Image (spheres, rainbow, N blue to C red):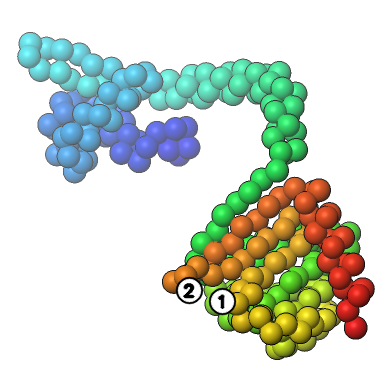
Amino acid sequence: MLQRVGLSRVEAKIYLSLLKGGPTSIRQLAAVTKVNRGTVYESIKSLVTIGLVSVKVVGSRSKYSAESPEKIQQIITEKQAQFKSVERDAKTLMPELMAYAKATAEEPKVRFYEGDEGVANILRDVLATTGKLDKKEYYVYSSRSLRQYLYRRFPNFTTQRIHDGIFAKVIGVGTGGDLAELSERKIIEDDSYETSSSYNIIYGDKVAMISVSSDLTPYGVVIEEAGVAAMQRLLFNRLWDSLS
């Protein structure tokens, strides 16, 4: 209960011990609560600061006493007043903060991801972003040499995509690749596809480009900008229509 009004577990334990046992020294508190003296001392300082514990110095010794539990209600009342003040300040600041957020949102964002988990994060974003679109569809340029690196941390990606009702249009560079449900594939035959190790995804206002480094570590870059995505989507659809 005391932890719900802001006390730590140790502070609550010390306050209850003082409430039951009366004025006590740091050494006695440490023995009774089985908490080391340093922690007891720091907790006592905190309790004195908020007004739940008082100190009386007798000679060279300090004795600590618990204040009345009624003080807890005062603390709660003070916190409520503070929260109301913060709420009023937040309402005043909200229009200004939203203006900043809008300005930031309009700037293009570029994010870099590395490793299998980074690629998995991109794929998760593809599903999350596309799943919110009116037309749940994304577009892919796929290189056969890269496909083996895509799903190592997200092997059920295609199953999840189908479950979410998301359609994929894929232009494959080179042969290969399985045609799954809710997808359509067209192929660009290219003798140089073995060196074309890139997998590009156009989804919503984002374009993701996934590749592998010289040490075969996959990485990806996501550009979030409506104009860039619109241009890439236009070029994809023009190429798509030209393929048999």
Residue 216's tag is 2
Q: Say left or right for 5 vs 103.
A: left
- Mark nearer the N terminus (2 vs 1): 1
Residue at x 51% of width, y 62% of height: 114
Residue at x 74% of width, y 27% of height: 99
Observer-nearest of 210 and 243:
243
Q: Position of residue 188 (x, y in %)?
A: 78, 81
Q: Position of residue 116 (x, y in %)?
A: 52, 69
In the picture as drawn, the residue positioned furthest to the left comes out as: 60
Q: Position of residue 41 (x, y in %)?
A: 21, 29
Circles 2, 1 touching at the beta carbon (< 8 Å): yes
Instruction: Say what amino acid the circle numbered 1 marks.
Output: Tyr
Q: Residues within 10 Å of mark 2 (few under 14, many from 20)?
A: few
Residue at x 22% of width, y 22% of height: 64
Residue 173 in sight in this render = yes
Residue 84 in sight in this render = no
Q: Say left or right for 48 vs 118.
A: left
- Callout 1: helix, strand or loop? helix
To which quarter of the image does residue 119 belong?
bottom right
For the N terminus, the image quarter is top left
Residue 105's tag is none
Measure how far apart labels 2 and 1 are at the Cα level.
Answer: 9 Å
Q: Residues within 10 Å of mark 1 (few under 14, many from 20)?
A: some
**Which of the two marks, 2 or 1, is nearer to us in this view?**
2
Observer-nearest of 184 and 180:
184
Q: Position of residue 176 (x, y in %)?
A: 70, 88
To which quarter of the image does residue 37 belong?
top left
Residue at x 49% of width, y 19% of height: 74
In the picture as drawn, the residue positioned furthest to the front comes out as: 191
Q: Say left or right for 200 vs 51.
A: right
Which residue carries the number 1 mark? 149
Instruction: Say what amino acid the circle numbered 2 marks.
Output: Leu
